[in-house]
C-alpha cells in the first residue's frame, strides 16, 4: 500500500456510505414511529375518502419530520465530521451550532479496531474504533471510512505510540489460526447451561410477541398440550436428545460468530488480530497498554486442553464484552508465546506456593448462606413441608462451593510479578506484572484483625486483583515489593524521557 496516498494532517471526511448506516440506525431507533406510519398507510388504503387520504399524507409527513428532528444531530455530524493527525495528537471535530473537538494524545491510544460488514466490503470501507486509556467507552468511532485510509491510520498510530526499540525491525509472525476442528472443540466445551437459558429467554420473548399479535396467550396452549401428552421413557429421552442437539447447534453458531477464521500475528509492538463470520473485525493490541492477563477453562475445556486468554487493557470496561480481548488457546506453548511479551517468567515456575486462611472457606457460608437457609426453611415449612428439601440442598451447594473456592485459591509471587490461581468448577489464572500497579489497598474487618489477616487489593488501570484472608506479614511483603517495582519503573520512565 502506498503510504503517501493519504495525508492525515489534512482533515478527512466520512465516506458517503456512512449516511446509509446513520439512516439505518435512525430507523432502528424510531421503529415505533415507523410502525405508526405503516399502520396509517394501511388504514388509508382501506378508506377511499380523499379527505382521509390527504390527512394521512400530512400525518406521514409530520411523523417523518419528528423522526428527522429527533436524530438531526446524527445527520449534521455526518456532514461536519473531520478527523486528522496534528503532531502527536489525533483530533476529531464535528457539529454545526454546538461544535465539538476531541483531542487524543497518540501515546494514549490502547487499541485500534477495524470492523467490516458485508456493506463495508461491497463499498471498500470499514468502521473504525479507537480506544484510549481515558475512558471505559470507545473514545472515537468512525462509522464508515475508506479501508485504505483506516489501514494507514492504524499503521501511523502503531509507529507513533512505540516508545522503545525504535531501531528494531518490526518482524511479524503468525501465532494462531482457528480451524474448523477447533471450532467444534470450542462448541463442545461451551457453557451449555448458559446457552440453554439464552434459548429459553429468547423463546419466552417470542411467545410474548405472539401474544401481542394473535391476541391470546400462546403459553396457555402449550400448557394444555403438555397436560394432554403422555410421556414414556423413550419419549423423554427423545426430547432430551433433541434439546441437547439444539443446544449444541446454538453453541456452535455462537462460537462461529465469535471465532471464525481468527488469526493472530505477533510483532514487537503487539498483536494484530482478525476474525469474523458475518462481519470481519481487525484489532491491534499494543503490548505496552496491557495491564493484566488471565486465562481460564471449565471442566470440559480442561480435558480438551483449551484455555480462554483475556487481556485487560487500560481504561477498559470489564462489563462490555465487545471491548474485551478474549482468545481461545488450544496449546500450552501458544499460551506461553502470547503471555511472554507481558511477563516471560511466571511466578508459579520459580516461587513458593501460598494459600489463604481457612476461614475464607466457611465464613460466607456461616454468616450469609446459613441464616438465609434457616429463614426460608421456616417459611417453606408452613407453606408446603414437602419443599423444605430445596433450601437444604441450596445450603449444601453453596457450602461446598465456598469450600472449593478456598481450596483452589493459591498464589505465587516473586520480585516482579504475582500469579493467582482460583475457581470453583473451572480454573482461572491471573498474572500481574507488579510495575503495572497503580495503588495498593489493605482492608481489614474486626474478625480479620482478631485473626491477624487482611484483604489485599492491587489496583491497575484495567482491573484489580484481590487476595482475601492473607496473613498480615505476607500482605506487607507483597505491598512493599509492589511499591518498589512501581517506583523503580517510574524512575526508569523519567530517565527515558530525559534522554529523549
Image (cartoon, helix red, strand yellow):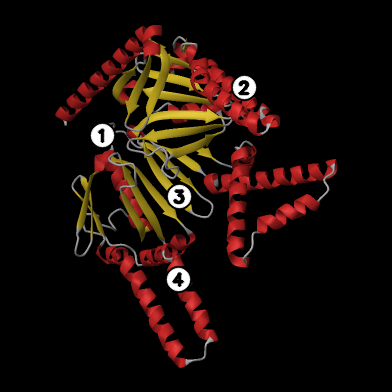
Of badges 1 and 2, the one in the foreground is 2
- List the residue tagged with mark 1: 163
Query: 383 and 260: which one is in front?
Result: 383
In the picture of the structure, the residue carrying the numbered disc 3 is 281
Q: Nearer the viewer, mark 4 or mark 3?
A: 4
The residue where tag 4 is placed is 34
Residue 348 visible in the snapshot: yes
Q: In this view, does 115 lie above or below 108?
A: below
Q: In which quarter of the image is the N terminus?
A: bottom left
Q: Where is residue 223 in the image (x, y as percent from the top left)?
A: 72, 52
The total number of labels drawn is: 4
Where's the C terminus, which quadrant?
top left
Helix, strand or loop under label 3: strand
Give the Cα separation between the discs numbered 4 and 3.
Answer: 31 Å
Q: Residues within 10 Å of mark 2 (few under 14, many from 20)?
A: some
Separation of residues labelled 1 and 2 (CA atoms): 54 Å
**Nearer the observer, disc 3 or disc 1?**
3
In the rendered image, residue 160, in percent from the top left (x then y), is placed at: 26, 42
Q: Do the residues labelled 3 and 1 touch (CB within 8 Å)?
A: no
> Which badge, 1 or 2, is on the more N-terminal residue?
1
The picture quadrant where one finds residue 299 is top right
Q: How far apart are marks 1 and 4 (CA)?
A: 52 Å
Which of the two discs, 3 and 2, sits closer to the camera?
2
**Which residue, given by chain and number where applicable, does mark 2 sit on?**
396
Residue at 66% x, 59% y: name it: 218
**Mark 3 or mark 1, earlier in chain:** 1
Alpha carbons under labels 4 and 2: distance apart = 53 Å
* Horizontal side, residue 377 vs residue 453: left or right: right
User: Residue 345 occupies which quadrant of the picture?
Assistant: top left
Amino acid at each position: 500500500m502506498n503510504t503517501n496516498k493519504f495525508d492525515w494532517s489534512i482533515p478527512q471526511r466520512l465516506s458517503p456510505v456512512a449516511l446509509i448506516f446513520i439512516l439505518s440506525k435512525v430507523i432502528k431507533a424510531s421503529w415505533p414511529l415507523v410502525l405508526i406510519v405503516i399502520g396509517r398507510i394501511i388504514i388509508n388504503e382501506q378508506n377511499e375518502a380523499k379527505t382521509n387520504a390527504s390527512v394521512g399524507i400530512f400525518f406521514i409527513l409530520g411523523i417523518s419530520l419528528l423522526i428527522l428532528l429527533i436524530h438531526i444531530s446524527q445527520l449534521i455530524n455526518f456532514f461536519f465530521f473531520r478527523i486528522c493527525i496534528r503532531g502527536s495528537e489525533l483530533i476529531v471535530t464535528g457539529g454545526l451550532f454546538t461544535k465539538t473537538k476531541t483531542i487524543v494524545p497518540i501515546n494514549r491510544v490502547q487499541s485500534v479496531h477495524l470492523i467490516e460488514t458485508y456493506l463495508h466490503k461491497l463499498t471498500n470501507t470499514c468502521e473504525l474504533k479507537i480506544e484510549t486509556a481515558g475512558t471505559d467507552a470507545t473514545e472515537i468511532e468512525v462509522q464508515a471510512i475508506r479501508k485504505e485510509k483506516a489501514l494507514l491510520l492504524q499503521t501511523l498510530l502503531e509507529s507513533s505510540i512505540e516508545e522503545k526499540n525504535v531501531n528494531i525491525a518490526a518482524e511479524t509472525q503468525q501465532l494462531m489460526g482457528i480451524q474448523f476442528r477447533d471450532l467444534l472443540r470450542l462448541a463442545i466445551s461451551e457453557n451449555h447451561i448458559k446457552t440453554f437459558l439464552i434459548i429459553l429467554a429468547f423463546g419466552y420473548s417470542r411467545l410474548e410477541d405472539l401474544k401481542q399479535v394473535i391476541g391470546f396467550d400462546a403459553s396457555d396452549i402449550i400448557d394444555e398440550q403438555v397436560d394432554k401428552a403422555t410421556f414414556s421413557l423413550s419419549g423423554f429421552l427423545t426430547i432430551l436428545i433433541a434439546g441437547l442437539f439444539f443446544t449444541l447447534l446454538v453453541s456452535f453458531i455462537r462460537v462461529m460468530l465469535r471465532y471464525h477464521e481468527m488469526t493472530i500475528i505477533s510483532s514487537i509492538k503487539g498483536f494484530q488480530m482478525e476474525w469474523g463470520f458475518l462481519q470481519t473485525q481487525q484489532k491491534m493490541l499494543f503490548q505496552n497498554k496491557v495491564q493484566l492477563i488471565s486465562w481460564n477453562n471449565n471442566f470440559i475445556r480442561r480435558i480438551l486442553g483449551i484455555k480462554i486468554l483475556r487481556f485487560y487493557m487500560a481504561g477498559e470496561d470489564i462489563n462490555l464484552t465487545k471491548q474485551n480481548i478474549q482468545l481461545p488457546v488450544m496449546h500450552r506453548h501458544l499460551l506461553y508465546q502470547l503471555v511472554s511479551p507481558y511477563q516471560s517468567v511466571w511466578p508459579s515456575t520459580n516461587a513458593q506456593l501460598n494459600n489463604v486462611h481457612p476461614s475464607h472457606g466457611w465464613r460466607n457460608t456461616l454468616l450469609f448462606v446459613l441464616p438465609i437457609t434457616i429463614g426460608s426453611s421456616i417459611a417453606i415449612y408452613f407453606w408446603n413441608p414437602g419443599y423444605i428439601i430445596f433450601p437444604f440442598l441450596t445450603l449444601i451447594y453453596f457450602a461446598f462451593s465456598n469450600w472449593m473456592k478456598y481450596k483452589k485459591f493459591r498464589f505465587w509471587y516473586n520480585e516482579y510479578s504475582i500469579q493467582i490461581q482460583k475457581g470453583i468448577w473451572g480454573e482461572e489464572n491471573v498474572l500481574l506484572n507488579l510495575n503495572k500497579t497503580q495503588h495498593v489497598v489493605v482492608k481489614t474487618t474486626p474478625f480479620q484483625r482478631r485473626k491477624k489477616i487482611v484483604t489485599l487489593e492491587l489496583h491497575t488501570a484495567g482491573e484489580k486483583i484481590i487476595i482475601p484472608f492473607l496473613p498480615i506479614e505476607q500482605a506487607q511483603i507483597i505491598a512493599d515489593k509492589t511499591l518498589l517495582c512501581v517506583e523503580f519503573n517510574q524512575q526508569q520512565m523519567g530517565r527515558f524521557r530525559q534522554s529523549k
